[in-house]
Image: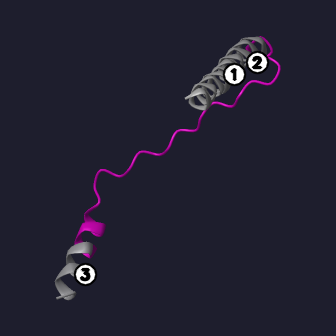
Amino acid sequence: MDVLGQGLVLMLAGMGIVYFFLALLILTTIVSMKGISRFNHILPEDAPKKKPAPKANDDENVALAIAVALNAR
């Protein structure tokens, strides 16, 4: 049972180190995001391009689809 107890302690210590490292990584990422946002005016991102609106009247494609479906039988 002594070996099982040592294994449990080792597992908890390892998981604690991993969770501490992940928390440190998240904190570092958040701090760096806030620091970098100060310099966003130097190289601003381009505005996203809008997609053209789809055609409301698409009768030709519907007729083609119906013709293909009827000839596929």
Specify start and end residues of the magenta stretch as a single range.
Answer: 37-64
Residue at 67% of width from left, 18% of height from top? 20
Q: Is residue 41 magenta?
A: yes
Q: Nearer the viewer, residue 4 or 55?
A: 4
Tell me the residue that label 2 is attached to: 40
Q: Is residue 32 left or right of residue 1?
A: right
Q: Is residue 42 left or right of residue 25?
A: right
Dots 3 and 1: beta carbons under 8 Å?
A: no
**Secondary structure beneath label 1:** helix
Mark closer to the chain start, 3 or 2: 2
Q: Main secondary structure of the magenta part?
A: loop
**2 or 1: tag closer to the N-terminus:** 1
Q: Where residue 59 is drawn, which disc sits there?
A: none
Does the stretch in magenta take in 54?
Answer: yes
Residue type for callout 1: Ile
Disc number for residue 68: 3
Mark 1 nearby-residue class (10 Å; few <14, some 14–19, many ≥20): few
Residue 36 vs residue 23: left or right? Answer: right
